[in-house]
Amino acid sequence: MTARAKIIDSAAWKGARPALSVLTPFLRDDPEELLALLDEEAASVDGAVEVIVLDDGTGDAALTARLTERIKGMALPARLITLPANEGRSIGRNRLAAAARGGSLLFLDSDMRPDHRRFLRDWAELVAREDPAVAFGGFSLLQAPTDARFAVHRAMAAKSECVPYTERAKQPEKYIYTSNLLVRRDVFEAEAFDPGFTGWGWEDVEWAMRVSRRFRVVHLDNAATHMGLDTVASLAGKYEQSAPNFARMVQRHPEIVAAYPSYKAAKLLKRLPGLPWLRRRMRGAAEAEWLPVATRAFSLRLYRAALYAEAV
C-alpha cells in the first residue's frame, strides 16, 4: 500500500495465516452488513479466511468511522483500506490482491449477501480439497429487493446471470463475474485485471477471456444474492459508462466478442439511419412504467447495443 492509504486492522489480523482472502472493493456502498454476515462464520473457518475491504475514494467520514469500529471488532482477521480518491475497479482489485496473504483470492462485491451460513466454509473447504485455479460460486436474487422500480433489472439478471451451476459448467468461460469469484494467487499474478478499463463494465469479462485460455474454470453451487439492483435510469447510465470498455474489449478480443449477441446487435444497429434518435426512443421505452416489464427489458438491451454500435 502507498502512504496515501489509511489502514485499519482487526485484532485477529496480526499473526493470521489464512489460506483464503476475501477481497471486497466498494465505492459509496456500505459493506457493513456483509462484514457482519461473514464474521458469523469466523469460528467455523478457524483462521483459514481473512477479509479485506477497500474504500475506493468514497470520502464519507461517517461511513469510515462505522466501518473502522466494525473491522476492529471482527473475530475474523480483517483489514479496511481507505483511499482518499477513486482509482477504479481494476486498480482497486489489483490493490486488494497485493494486500492479501491467502493463496486463493475470493472477489466478493460489497452488495452481495451469502445465501446460506456455510458460505465461507464451503469456499475454504474447496480450496483445501481441490485448490482450483478459478471457480465461480454463482449469484441469485433470493434476498434482493422486489420493489417495482427494480423490476427491469431483476428480469434481466434472472434471465442472463442467475444461471444454475450445472448450466454454467457447460460454458465455463462465459459465466465469470467478480461478484463471487475465486482465483488462485498464481493465476491472478499471471493474469491481473487490465487497469486500462475505467468506470463500469466488462473488465471481468475481458479478464475471463484471457484466463480461460490458460486455466480450468470450475463452477459450483455456493451462491450469494446480488442486492444492488438498479433502476432503469441507473442501469442506462452504467451502460453509457461502459461503452469505451466494450470498445477496448472488442479491440483486444475481436474473435471472441464477434460471437456475443450484444456485438451482433450493435453491428446491425450501426447500419440504421438516425440511430441517435432511435437510441433515445429505446431508452424512453425502457423507462415507460406502463409497458410490460419484458418489453422494457428488451428495450434496455437494445439501448445498450445501440450505445455499443459506436464501438464496433
Image (cartoon, grey):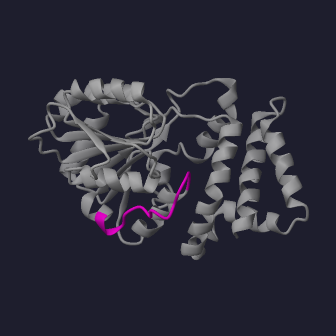
From the viewer's side, name the closer residue of 186 and 244: 244
Residue 172 placed where, x, y %? 45, 59
Is any atom of residue 144 visible in this view? yes
Coordinates of residue 128 in the picture (x, y in percent): 18, 49
Q: Residue at x 40, y 43 (%)?
A: 84
User: On the rendered structure, is 299 left or right of 198?
Assistant: right
Does residue 37 appear anywhere in the picture? no
Relative to residue 42, is residue 97 depicted above or below? Answer: below
Q: Residue 58: horizontal and vertical position, in percent? A: 46, 37
- Decide if residue 295 is on the left or right side of residue 102: right
Up-down relation of residue 166 to residue 196 (above or below): above
The residue at the point 60 percent across, 70 percent down is 250
Q: Which residues are magenta?
A: 189-201
Q: From this view, report whether residue 143 is shown above or below residue 246.
A: above
Per the image, is 125 magenta? no
Tell me the residue at 33%/45% (across/down).
Answer: 23
Q: Position of residue 235 (x, y in %)?
A: 65, 42
Screen quadrant of the C terminus: bottom right
